[in-house]
Image: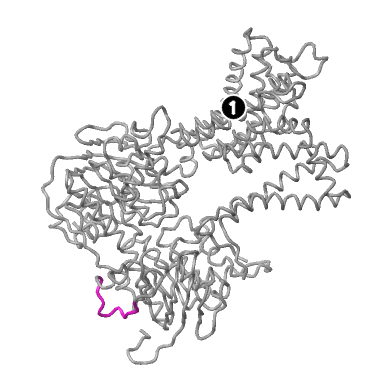
């Protein structure tokens, strides 16, 4: 590490009194911070705390209302992304900005060459990308199209794009939101190599564990203000959480409870879609228990969730709900059987962004006699229902008549919870229910899931967050290449056990068959 | 110069910007008029007088707006569900064909029975024309933009064949035209001795019905949900393909009514120049109206006024009536730009 305990550290970036106001909202309130050479600075804050606005100002997408930025002592002209790039600031966005139909090479070179050149120096670029990849452990074949890459590989391309432009300061916006725990760990190793070679990094996140694992120093934003600036040494998760949210966060606790009759029973169920498949899945979930499904992303979780939410018809096997075999597996049949479905992707599947809160609240039930007669919807009743859900589920919004896309991620998830859980479901399918949410919203979702459990609902929780699975589940199974392991009691399970299962040990035809 | 998304949309802006858009379109047109050597004030004056300046002119504008309301509604309904119906022209002609097939003496009914039967048949004909591309889209993923567009030409040739063959009027002196519909099939004129007919009233009623349907009916809600986000609609249990099929029937039916209204209300018979592109202009009308059913009425009257006014103007001022096309196109471009400014603000740096 270039960082020493005593010596003066070079300041590579200094923000001084940055203020940005949108209408009535003060997104950034006189924020000052410094970044030293060879340092990973964690920028922590809930959704809406002002992290993204601050970084957009730094990168020249927005112009600050007041305040100055200096890179290596030189002032940075405001509102000019080209100047920020030239000053060596590289940004890796949470939502990738790659052209999927172009190759890795084209994506990286795009925009770096003069428009007046007739030929592009592809060979030179290719060897430079290879060298950067080898130096930093970011190997990606420059000649494959981006469409064929995994999410983790796409992120490497984004980082290479910044490095190719000689970035000295790298900003990573929620880089682990799309990664599995394994991929995140690999990313942290890469970041350590970067700072060892003299780069400086701003790591934006709202996941406390990651900030503690990856960063040297952490800066916390809350409501647009900078509320803390700490070395990570000697700081605990709980302290960070409290600084970030502004109040103590209750940890979700799952009280032991005797399970009742079986609600959902899958018998040798198989399904296939494209390259994904489920094979002979057996599963039983009883009233008043949480069954967690662990697994590395892409092993069939989404297909399993699609079958239970009615989006995918199984090819073989039996699906029993409340003791009755279901033949037509459709979303309506599932809703009618009392299944509360929390989808993996709020924006794509859960809500219709351009429709109002009221319209979204009734999207599963608008045909019910309570809400419509003779094919006409009673919007007054629908609006009342929306108001009930808004107050019962603490959805922050100006009125039920605003489009859902204006809500934050956490409030969107609360709205979905309200829509599906308000009627006392028999089974709750929670597919990645806390992905991308901030600490406060995560604890809210957990509390609501446990509340449903205590009212006797059966809960199927699919998550890539092992901590979440272990703290909420009563029984856990692992999914690997479309097969499901037998369920085991949470108390008899450790992270190490799950890790082995997730890598395929213990599955027929998995890793262990070579060893045994 | 950069665009920043707006956090809120001030109401004043939402009303001011479209007005500004039309003004801008007018200014650009004025430059073109000057280029052709005429005075813009004189030309616009003549246009306004020609479109609205007398009872005759105003009724003529409303007459021209009638088919545009129907085709504009057809397009608006379909576009809301993201069913890209570019084939209102074909649906209009099939609606007209149904009207002359059944309305020229085949059904010996009195007018209170005959007119509803003709309306229903014309709507059914138009609906079926759009149902085919929609089936191909939902079943095989065939792009409906291509199929509905190309069907326009196929249907026009088919109508041409009918008019040279089975539908040709034996008393028509050899012209490719159908027989006149019987008196019981004809719509009454709204003003004695003028061309404006009851089809206009029915068009307004249709717009109001579509509006109520869109706001209140479960199917209207389903159509909007499918249009905004078909994946989320499917997840919530809305049957996407059946909703698209019903959208197609409604949209095609409305376009079919345009054909019926032109034949029964105005022309009396079917010729190949029944529609000077009402189906295509319907797209412009729907877009200018931001796909709002009541907005369609206003936009259709505006577009009709531009065309009628330009016709009258070109007779006396010598500026080609093509200026109408330029003006409508510019209005659309300016309107689209104005909509963008209601969502984004410009930052000068």
Q: Identify the residue at horizontal 73%, vertical 33% (top origin).
A: B61
Residue B183 x, y percent position in the rendering: 70, 12
Dividing the picture into quadrants, the one containing residue B104 is top right
> Measured along the vertical axis of the image, is residue A87 above or below residue B191?
below
Count neighbours of disc 1 (C-alpha within 10 A) and say few if under 14, some if 14 to 19, many if 20 or more.
Answer: many
Which residue is nearer to you in this view: B189 or A134?
Answer: B189
Which residue is nearer to you in this view: A266 or B241?
Answer: B241
Element type at mark 1: helix
What segment carries the magenta color? A228-237
Which residue is nearer to you in this view: B234 or A24?
Answer: A24
Residue A401 x, y percent position in the rendering: 44, 47
In which quadrant will I find the C terminus of chain B?
bottom right
Residue A508 x, y percent position in the rendering: 22, 49
Residue B32 x, y percent position in the rendering: 81, 51
| Magenta residue check for A235 | yes
Q: Is residue A79 left or right of residue A514?
A: right
Instruction: Check the image and name the residue furthest to the top.
Output: B108
In which quadrant will I find the N terminus of chain B?
bottom right
Q: Is residue B162 left or right of residue A387?
A: right
* Parent chain of label 1: B
Q: According to the image, label 1 marks what residue? A: B129
Q: Is residue B252 left or right of residue B31?
A: left
């Amino acid at each position: 590490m270039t960082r020493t305990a005593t010596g003066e550290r070079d300041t590579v970036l200094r923000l001084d009194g940055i203020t940005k106001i949108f209408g009535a909202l003060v997104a950034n309130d006189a924020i000052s911070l410094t970044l030293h050479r060879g340092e990973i600075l964690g920028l922590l804050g809930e959704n809406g705390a002002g992290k993204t606005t601050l970084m957009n100002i730094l990168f020249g997408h927005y112009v600050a209302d007041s305040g100055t930025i200096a890179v290596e002592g030189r002032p940075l002209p405001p509102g000019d992304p080209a100047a920020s790039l030239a000053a060596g600031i590289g940004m890796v966005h949470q939502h990738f900005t790659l052209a999927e139909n172009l190759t890795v090479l084209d994506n990286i070179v795009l925009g770096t060459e003069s428009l007046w050149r007739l030929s592009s120096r592809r060979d030179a670029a290719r060897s430079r990308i290879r060298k950067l990849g080898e130096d930093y452990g970011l190997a990606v074949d420059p000649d494959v199209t981006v469409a064929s890459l995994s999410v983790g590989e796409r992120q490497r391309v984004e980082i290479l794009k910044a490095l190719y432009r000689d970035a000295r300061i790298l900003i990573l916006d929620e880089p682990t939101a799309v990664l599995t725990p394994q991929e995140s760990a690999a990313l942290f190793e890469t970041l350590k190599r970067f700072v060892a070679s003299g780069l400086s990094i701003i790591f934006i996140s709202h996941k406390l564990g990651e900030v503690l694992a990856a960063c040297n120093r952490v800066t916390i934003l809350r409501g647009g203000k900078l509320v803390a600036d700490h070395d990570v040494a000697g700081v605990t998760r709980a302290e960070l959480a409290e600084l970030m949210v502004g109040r103590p966060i209750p940890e979700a606790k799952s009280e032991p409870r005797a399970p009742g009759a079986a609600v959902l029973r899958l018998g040798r169920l198989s399904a296939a879609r494209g390259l994904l498949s489920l094979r002979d899945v057996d599963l039983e979930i009883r009233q008043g228990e949480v069954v967690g499904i662990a697994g590395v992303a892409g092993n069939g979780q989404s297909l399993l969730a699609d079958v239970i939410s009615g989006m995918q018809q199984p090819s073989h096997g039996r699906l029993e709900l409340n003791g009755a075999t279901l033949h037509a597996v459709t979303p309506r049949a599932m809703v009618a059987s009392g299944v509360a479905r929390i989808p993996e992707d709020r924006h794509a599947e859960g809500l219709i962004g351009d429709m109002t809160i009221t319209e979204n609240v009734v999207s599963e039930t608008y045909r019910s006699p309570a809400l419509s007669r003779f094919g006409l919807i009673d919007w007054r009743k629908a609006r009342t229902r929306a108001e009930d859900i808004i107050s019962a589920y603490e959805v922050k919004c100006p009125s039920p008549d605003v489009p859902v896309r204006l809500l934050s991620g956490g409030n969107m998830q609360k709205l979905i919870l309200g829509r599906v859980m308000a009627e006392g479901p028999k089974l709750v399918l929670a597919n990645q229910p806390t992905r991308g949410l901030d600490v406060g919203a995560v604890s809210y979702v957990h509390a609501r899931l446990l509340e449903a459990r205590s009212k006797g609902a059966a809960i199927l929780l699919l998550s890539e967050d092992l901590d979440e699975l272990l703290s909420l589940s009563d029984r856990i199974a692992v999914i690997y290449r479309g097969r499901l392991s037998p369920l085991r009691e949470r108390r008899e399970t450790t992270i190490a056990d799950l890790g082995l299962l997730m890598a395929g040990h213990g599955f027929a035809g998995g890793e262990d068959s070579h060893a045994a | 110069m950069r665009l920043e998304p707006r956090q809120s949309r001030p109401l004043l802006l939402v009303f001011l910007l479209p007005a500004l858009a039309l003004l801008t379109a007018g200014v650009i047109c004025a430059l073109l008029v000057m280029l052709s050597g005429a005075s813009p004030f004189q030309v616009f004056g003549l246009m306004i007088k020609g479109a609205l300046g007398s009872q005759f002119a105003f009724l003529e504008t409303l007459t021209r707006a009638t088919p545009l309301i129907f085709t504009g509604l057809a397009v608006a309904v379909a576009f809301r569900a993201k069913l890209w119906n570019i084939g209102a022209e074909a649906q209009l002609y099939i609606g007209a064909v149904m009207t002359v097939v059944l309305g020229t003496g085949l059904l010996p009914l009195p007018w209170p029975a005959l007119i509803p039967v003709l309306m229903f048949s014309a709507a059914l004909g138009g609906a079926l024309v759009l149902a085919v591309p929609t089936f191909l889209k939902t079943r095989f993923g065939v792009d409906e933009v291509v199929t509905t567009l190309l069907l326009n030409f196929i249907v026009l040739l088919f109508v041409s064949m009918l008019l040279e063959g089975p539908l040709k009027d034996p008393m028509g002196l050899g012209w490719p035209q159908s027989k006149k519909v019987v008196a019981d099939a004809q719509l009454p004129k709204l003003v004695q001795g003028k061309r404006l007919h009851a089809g206009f009233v029915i068009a307004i009623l249709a717009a109001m019905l579509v509006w109520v349907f869109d706001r209140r009916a479960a199917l209207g809600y389903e159509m909007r949900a499918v249009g905004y986000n078909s994946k989320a609609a499917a997840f919530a249990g809305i049957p996407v393909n059946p909703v698209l099929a019903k959208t197609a029937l409604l949209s095609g039916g409305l376009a079919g009514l345009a054909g019926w209204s032109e034949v029964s209300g105005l022309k009396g018979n079917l010729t190949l120049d029944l529609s000077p592109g009402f189906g295509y202009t319907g797209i412009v009308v729907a877009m200018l109206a931001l796909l709002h059913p009541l907005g369609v009425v206003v936009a259709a009257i505006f577009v009709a006024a531009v065309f009628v006014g330009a016709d009258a103007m070109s007779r006396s001022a010598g500026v080609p009536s093509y200026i109408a096309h330029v003006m409508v196109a510019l209005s659309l471009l300016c309107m689209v730009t104005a909509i963008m400014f209601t969502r984004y603000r410009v930052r000068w740096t």
